[in-house]
Amino acid sequence: MVDHQFGYAKLDQPGVVEILFHPRQESDSTPPPGAIDYEIAVEEGVCVGARFHMADTTAPNILFFHGNGEIVGDYDSIGPMYNEHDLSLLAVDYRGYGRSGGTPTVTSMMRDAHVIFKEIRNWLKNEKRTGPLLVMGRSLGSACALELAASYEQDMSGLIIDSGFPHTVPLLNCLGVDTQSLGITEADGFRNIQKIGQFSKPTFIIHAQHDQFIPVTSAEILQVQCIARSKEFQMVAGADHNTILLRTGKQYFEVIKKFINKIQGIREKRSYRKRREGKINQEK
């Protein structure tokens, strides 16, 4: 484990926080069938809400950090699709989002990620869920995922980045933050490039071809800087930042399942027809 110093004070300025975070409350706090709600105390008097969509006790577990305008309830129809592929999705919110208390800041988000990871790791152990643990981050959530990857490599089996970003200043500028007047440089940012350069476990990067906020070249930079021997990059043709799932459908979950199967050493089963065709071709 690598202990990181939390130095995100310049990103906690109102001119950044009000643009980077778009918290909204959960309108319906009832989890869908098969899902459970869980609260994680991140500091005294403040809890962060989570919603777990659990598959079999031996299924792989994905700790998921969502994008800035999302809440865990947005994944109520998506969690079951992970379950259909024998994957458990453990989605967590940020402060002020969904059922969570507090007010979001960059410093609290990054610090909370550590607390959340340790709590979920212990919960899985206590519940005797033996499947591998992976961390996944989408958009803003990629910062949390990379923070944990750089800190808990030995406790993770893999990393999945959906619509992630390598540099902080270009993203903030794209969102409308005047980083120059606020005195923000890359040294004050998330340092995602350095973090992905510390993680050597299997890594899978997914990105939209026409992402209007984080260009696809950002994913290519992360892919190049990633030091994992086993790393994959999937560009979703025709999609933008918010339409990856719409464009891919079930294929999105299939490629994630295939990636995790490789981690577990599980070979894909060929159909009887394909096996038979192979045999016929050998006989010829």
Image (tube, grey):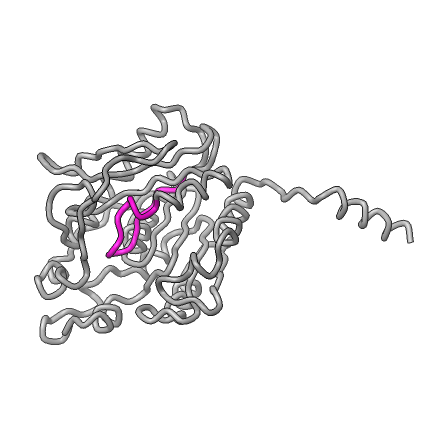
- Horizontal relation, residue 282 to residue 190: left or right: right
- Percent of width and height locating residue 251: 52, 53
> Which residue sits at x=30%, y=51%?
66
In the displayed structure, 127 sits above or below 245; it is above
Is 2 or 34 nearer to us in this picture?
A: 34
Quadrant location, the C terminus:
bottom right
In the displayed structure, 192 sits above or below 38; it is below
Q: Quadrant of residue 211?
A: bottom left
> Which residue sits at x=51%, y=46%?
257
In reply to whether residue 119 is colored magenta, the answer given is no
- Percent of width and height locating residue 98: 21, 44
> Which residue sits at x=32%, y=50%?
145
> Which residue sits at x=36%, y=54%?
198
Question: Which residue range is magenta in the image?
Answer: 61-75
- Percent of width and height locating residue 8: 15, 57
Q: Residue furthest right?
A: 284
Q: Quadrant of residue 217?
A: bottom left
- Horizontal relation, residue 2 to residue 159: left or right: left
In the displayed structure, 36 sits above or below 203; it is above
In reply to whether residue 62 is colored magenta, the answer given is yes
- Horizontal relation, residue 14 to residue 145: left or right: left
- Percent of width and height locating residue 124: 36, 30
- Horizontal relation, residue 156 to residue 186: left or right: right
Q: How many marks?
A: 0
Q: Residue furthest front?
A: 28
Quadrant location, the N terminus:
top left
